[in-house]
Image (tube, rainbow, N blue to C red):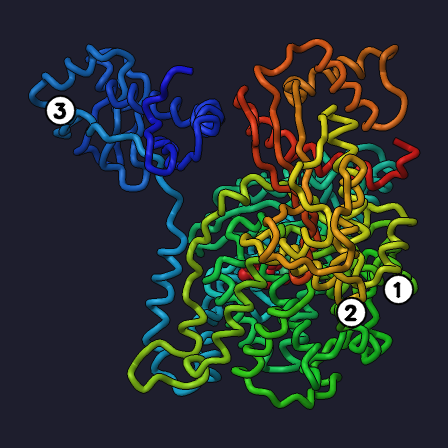
């Protein structure tokens, strides 16, 4: 391959100066330069260079000058292909010509006069093209801390600091008023187009946890409009087309759309059009249709706030009332939420500005605080089930099939007997989640307890509510059930990394809260109390090993009933039997589906000692395996059993059990044995062109394989192996499986390491497996082997 001038060698491998990334070896360089990011940046760079060579910088214009004035003036020097003006201030423009000769002609003119204005025309500055790094989040966070530090350090106690955080960040009265006026305006506008509709704010603007410039979440309730429309329609039918009893639907937007049958996206398109046309200062109006709840986003220029309008979100209005009630029940909740939200923001754990992605959203974080307060001894807040019992008949409320009953006033709830102060509760929050078994539990605010995952799956649905089994929540590394919509895991967007990050930061905070620095004001003017808690998290570098691992998460909901029963019977030791099944499935995919030759490593220790050795090996995976095996051990199965678990699927192709089971080897006298693994040999590029071959096979009905996708994928491999030449040399890869659990979410992790890769295809193989293997293993696990 032709050398790429952006790639430079470094003592640790290579670096791409264009994309600003480090690359460990030649094959990753080859991959990188072919990749989309590198190719796009090259194109952007060459376009910019061309633009630079063809354009001039013009200053001396005024906001009254239009783009066409500028184009007209400069056309005398040659065809103008583009004019970019700074819209806000209107003092400069960049004029781009179609030909370089025009540039010379423009620059050689000594004086430029345009409609009485004297213009200054300069060549463009030649700037090196650089990828502009995203706004440095940690710098911003550091600045936020610097601003907060002096006032916080002056206060006398952590309790006072927590109260200060509320005062510093809470929505001011004027901000609340301005929001109220905007809501009123929107109500007036929408009711014109959607008669009897109602706009209701929810979320942080009104749930008592709002901070300066937080989003304005709005629910446009169209239920009454639907009734109105149905009535108007029937009246129109009776009276003849196009008329209605009060004339309101004629010519209205409602004549274009049937609200009962229209999709959310269609209605939101209308909402967006109304916002654009009729709401002054509403800018950047966009419909985001793909989200769980489709939404229209807009920016209110004058108030400088982000607004979100949804139309199917009655539950959110109700859970906002619930949070308001919680705030009213105990005055410690609000300052705790403010402090924990700020901590989480500084640690980059929550509050994704874009609202998506793998971070906790603020709602989820608030629920974690509420849950912790339910778990305090004695509880600070009651469970949602208890609140339901305290409500009177008129307060009964069911939304979308979910029981959302609770008292409307805090006065109906007896005060808590818990007298802990804010500083102690904050410390308690960190301790609680530092040790929390996220992997094995589902958090239920309804019941105010963490349900073991296996119990949760076998639990009966609450009486009179939706069957959660059918519409079950998407369980994940952090399973936090919505207090009302039990089919929704509010932290379902988290990945393992972000869940681990959250727990790690809780552990750090817990450790810090034990120190005097947290508890006592520094007499030497040093940072103390909350200040150190708010220190931004440093960027955690990814270890190279992490890049070459494939995770297969534990997804109990998709396992067959029989296997789930077996795992349930294993109680806390469920990881081991599950891991055995995963290893069988991995072997099945590699050998059966992908036609790899699998061999045991000659020096792998397949007996108990391999497990013992794993405990002493460095590296996070081994350490994690140690975690999981601890938990296995605690269920009464020793290390021998653990190895049997890891060994069983491997043993089909290995001569297992050289060492006596159960005996602890004397490591000092033995050669260090390797943990169990496969050596996987592949002679064909079975990953290349798979999609096309699959399509061909599916199209060709005669050869379409009967049965599941496993059969089809096996056939795809066979077709590639038959038609394509062998690789330049066989690819030999060591694949080491391990199970992780304990305080992390349960998963099997496969570490892949190339042993021989003459054809330089290891990365292709790895990237293919990264997506293919977990899905295929899931398919294997979902079905009985006989179905495959
Ligand atoms: P946010 O997570 O934005 O919370 O959810 P927030 O309190 O408004 O915080 P900001 O806006 O980040 O400052 C907004 C509202 O959306 C509903 C809740 O009513 C929440 O208050 N919501 C959010 C849900 O009902 N379920 C979810 O999973 C998330």
Q: Is residue 8 above or below residue 392?
A: above
Q: Nearer the viewer, residue 548 or 114?
A: 548
State which mark lies toward you, 3 or 1: 1
The picture quadrant for ligand 1 comes to bottom right
Question: Which image quarter holds the C terminus?
Answer: top right
Q: In the rendered structure, are the residues bearing label 2 and label 1 in contact, judged by CB atoms less than 8 Å apart?
A: yes
Query: Does residue 524 appear to the left or right of 485 in the view shown?
Result: left
Which numbered disc flags the more N-terminal residue, 2 or 3?
3
Q: Are marks 2 and 3 in contact (CB under 8 Å)?
A: no
Res 218 seen here = yes
Q: Is 501 on the left-hand or right-hand side of 68?
A: right
Crowd class of label 3 (few under 14; some 14 to 19; many from 20; radius 10 Å) = few
Tell me, yes or no, if residue 202 can be seen here: no
In the rendered image, the vertical position of residue 359 relative to residue 692, given as above or below: below
Quadrant of residue 702 in the image? top right
Task: Check disc 1: other Cα within 10 Å, few if <14, some if 14-19, many if 20+.
Answer: few
Residue 729 position in % (x across, y down): 58, 18
Q: Nearer the viewer, mark 2 or mark 3?
A: 2
Task: Identify the image quadrant of residue 437.
Answer: bottom right
At 62% from the left edge and 35% from the top edge, which residue is drawn? 734
Mark 2 beta carbon near ligand 1 (under 8 Å)? no
**Tag on residue 113?**
3
The residue tagged 2 is 446
- Expressed as whole percent of the image width and height from the top left, the position of residue 426 reads 55, 77
Earlier in the chain: of badge 3 and badge 1, it is 3
Which residue is tagged 1? 462
- Residue at coordinates 77% horizontally, 26% vertically from top-left? 593
For marks 2 and 3, give the CA distance: 74 Å
Q: Secondary structure at mark 1?
A: loop
- Quadrant into which the N terminus falls: top left
């Amino acid at each position: 391959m032709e050398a790429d001038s952006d790639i430079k060698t470094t003592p640790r491998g290579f670096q791409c100066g264009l994309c600003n990334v480090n690359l460990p070896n030649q094959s990753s360089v080859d991959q990188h330069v072919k990749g989309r990011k590198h190719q796009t940046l090259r194109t952007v760079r060459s376009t910019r260079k061309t633009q630079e060579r063809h354009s001039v910088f013009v200053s001396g214009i005024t906001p009254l000058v239009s783009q066409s004035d500028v184009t007209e003036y400069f056309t005398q020097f040659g065809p103008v292909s583009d004019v970019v003006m700074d819209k806000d201030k209107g003092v400069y423009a960049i004029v781009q010509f179609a030909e370089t000769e025009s540039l010379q002609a423009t620059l050689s003119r000594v004086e430029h006069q345009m409609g009485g204005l004297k213009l200054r025309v300069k060549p463009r500055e030649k700037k090196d093209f650089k990828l502009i790094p995203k706004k440095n989040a940690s710098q911003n966070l550091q600045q936020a801390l610097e601003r907060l530090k002096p006032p916080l350090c002056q206060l006398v106690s952590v309790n006072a600091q927590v109260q200060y955080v509320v005062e510093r960040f809470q929505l001011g009265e004027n901000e609340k008023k301005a929001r109220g006026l905007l809501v009123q305006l929107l109500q007036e506008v929408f009711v014109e187009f959607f008669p009897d509709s109602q706009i209701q704010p929810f979320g942080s603007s009104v749930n008592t946890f709002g901070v300066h410039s937080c989003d304005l979440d709005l629910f446009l309730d169209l239920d009454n409009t639907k009734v109105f429309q149905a009535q108007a329609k029937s009246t129109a039918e009776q009276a003849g087309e196009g008329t209605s009893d009060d004339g309101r639907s004629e010519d209205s937007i409602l004549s274009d759309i049937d609200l009962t049958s229209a999709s959310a996206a269609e209605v939101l398109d209308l909402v967006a059009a109304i916002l654009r046309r009729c709401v002054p200062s509403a800018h950047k109006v966009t419909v985001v249709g793909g989200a769980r709840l489709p939404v229209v986003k807009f920016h209110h220029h004058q108030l400088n706030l982000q607004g979100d309008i949804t139309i199917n979100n009655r539950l959110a209005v109700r859970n906002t009332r619930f949070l308001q009630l919680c705030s009213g029940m105990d005055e410690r909740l609000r300052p705790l939420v403010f402090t924990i939200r700020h901590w989480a923001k500084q640690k980059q754990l929550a509050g994704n500005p874009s609202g998506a992605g793998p971070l906790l959203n603020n709602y989820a974080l608030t629920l974690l605080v509420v849950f912790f307060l339910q778990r305090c001894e004695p509880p600070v807040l009651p469970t949602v089930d208890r609140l339901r019992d305290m409500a009177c008949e008129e307060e009964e409320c069911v939304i979308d099939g979910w029981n959302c009953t609770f008292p409307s006033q805090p006065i109906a709830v007896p005060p808590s007997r818990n007298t802990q102060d804010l500083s102690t509760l904050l410390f308690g929050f960190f301790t609680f989640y530092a040790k929390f078994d996220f992997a094995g539990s589902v958090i239920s605010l309804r019941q105010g307890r963490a349900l073991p995952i296996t119990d949760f799956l076998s639990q009966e649905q609450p009486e009179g509510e939706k069957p959660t089994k059918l519409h079950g929540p998407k369980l994940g590394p952090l399973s936090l059930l919505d207090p009302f919509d039990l089919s929704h895991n509010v932290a379902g967007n988290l990945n393992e990394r972000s869940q681990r990050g959250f727990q790690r930061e809780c552990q750090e905070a817990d450790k810090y809260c034990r120190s005097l620095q947290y508890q006592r004001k520094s007499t030497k003017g040093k940072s103390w109390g909350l200040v150190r808690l708010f220190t931004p998290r440093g960027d955690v570098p990814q270890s190279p090993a992490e890049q070459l691992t494939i995770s297969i998460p534990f997804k109990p909901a998709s396992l067959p009933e029989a296997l789930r029963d077996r795992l349930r019977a294993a109680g806390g030791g469920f990881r081991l039997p599950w891991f055995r099944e995963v290893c069988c499935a991995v072997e099945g995919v590699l050998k059966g589906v992908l036609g790899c030759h699998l061999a045991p490593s000659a020096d792998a220790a397949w007996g108990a000692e391999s497990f013992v050795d794993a405990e002493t090996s460095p590296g996070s995976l081994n350490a994690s395996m140690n975690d999981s095996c601890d938990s296995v051990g605690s269920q009464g199965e020793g290390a021998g059993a653990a190895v049997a678990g890891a060994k069983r699927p491997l043993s089909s192709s290995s001569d297992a059990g050289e060492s006596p089971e159960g005996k602890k080897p004397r490591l000092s006298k033995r050669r260090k044995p390797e943990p169990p693994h496969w050596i996987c040999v592949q002679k064909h590029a079975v990953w290349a062109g798979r999609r096309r071959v699959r399509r061909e096979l599916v199209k060709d009905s005669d050869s379409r394989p009967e049965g599941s996708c496993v059969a089809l994928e096996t056939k795809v491999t066979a077709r590639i192996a038959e038609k394509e030449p062998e690789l330049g040399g066989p690819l030999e890869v060591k694949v080491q499986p391990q199970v992780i659990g304990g305080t992390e979410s349960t998963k099997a992790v496969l570490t892949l390491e190339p042993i021989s890769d003459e054809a330089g295809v290891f990365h292709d193989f790895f990237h293919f497996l990264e997506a293919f293997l977990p899905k295929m293993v899931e398919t294997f696990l979902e079905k009985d082997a006989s179905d495959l």
